[in-house]
Amino acid sequence: MSNTHKEQQAIALRQEGMSYKKIELITGLTDYKIKILTKGIQKVTPINTPLAKSVERVYPLAKRQHGIREYELRDIMHEEYGSKWDTKNGKYISSYDQNDLNYVKQKIRIRAAQHDCDVLFTPDWIDEGAPTAGREFLEAAAKDIAARIEEHTNQYMDCHSTRWREDSEEVDLAQRKQHYAARRHLLKLAIQGYGMEPLARLLERSLVLTDLLEGTPDTPMTSANGDWHVDEASKYYPEPTRANPFLDYAESQGWLKDVEGSFV
């Protein structure tokens, strides 16, 4: 590291509030030199914000040899930014978003550059003991899966192509669209979380549609606006008190009301 770089680093560290002794250990500059360089610089008082607290907690973990894993980073973000209870899905939703996450990473990379060190943000799938072998295994597996998906999609098109007796540009377009849609539907069925729609709902909706096309008489009718009729009212999950999660859940389901007056 050049002296100019060390001097700039010393100034930046002092601005962050670091002591002369620590700056001396990091930069190798003398105590006298550091005091001359940083004369008149006011130490910055740390800001007590979710961003600042997240950076302070994440930075030392990101400096480790294998960096900070994704779940560790998100756990810290969840704790510092807080969460909100989702009454529709019955779970806590983190208050931070992707922009907050990116900004924390950016601040940490800037600090690492000032301190002349490396930081790593490591995906959870990484095997620290054999990162290259693990990556190559998953890449090979992905190629195999992709080939199998394409194979099944082509088999589907061989058996179930739309308007297969016809021959026109319009039919070619319809079949290309069908191939694309069939592949996406297959992925939604096979890979959890690939589609936004829950798998159970997708299966039910597909069953209703195919029954309609088959002429099954028991198929439920659609509403006037074209949406599928839903018999069950939208569920509501009250936020748990955490005193007794089971009783919270039982009350939310109306079970306690059902047995009111049964006990003396």
Image (spheres, rainbow, N blue to C red):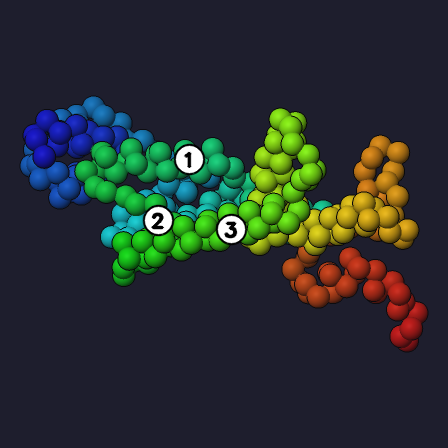
What is the CA distance from the residue labelled 2 to the residue labelled 1? 14 Å
Q: Secondary structure at mark 1?
A: helix
Q: Is tag 2's residue or tag 1's residue first in the polypeptide sequence?
A: 1
Q: Residue furthest bottom?
A: 264
At horizontal 21% and vertical 41% (from top left) the residue drawn is: 117
The residue positioned 90% from the left and 51% from the top of the image is: 217
- In the rendering, which numbered label is found on residue 102? 1
Q: Residue furthest top?
A: 40
Q: Earlier in the sequence, mark 2 or mark 3?
A: 2
Tag nearer the camera, 2 or 1: 2
Q: Mark 2 falls on what kind of element?
A: strand
Question: Which residue appears at 57% of the width and 44% of the height?
Answer: 183
Estimate the spatial distance between the alpha carbons at disc 1 and disc 3, rounded to whole Å: 38 Å
Q: Nearer the viewer, residue 99 or 79?
A: 99
The one nearer the camera, 98 or 41, is: 98
Question: Quadrant of the image for the N terminus?
Answer: top left
The mark nearer the N terminus, 1 or 3, is 1
What residue is shown with label 2? 122
Q: Is residue 31 visible?
A: no
Where residue 20 appears, x then y in whole percent? 17, 38
Q: Is residue 243 above or below residue 91?
A: below
Q: Is residue 219 left or right of residue 175?
A: right
Of the residues tagged 2 and 3, which is closer to the observer? Answer: 3
**Label 2 Cα neighbours within 10 Å, binned few <14 / some 14-19 / many ≥20:** some
The residue singled out by tag 3 in the image is 151
Pick the residue in front: 231 or 136.
Answer: 136
CA neighbours of label 1 inside 10 A, class few (<14), some (14 to 19), many (20+): few
Q: State the residue at coordinates (88%, 43%).
A: 221
Number of the label disc, if any, that sits on residue 71? none
| Residue kind at label 3, given as amino acid type | Glu
Callouts 1 and 3 close, C-beta under 8 Å: no
Q: Secondary structure at mark 3?
A: helix
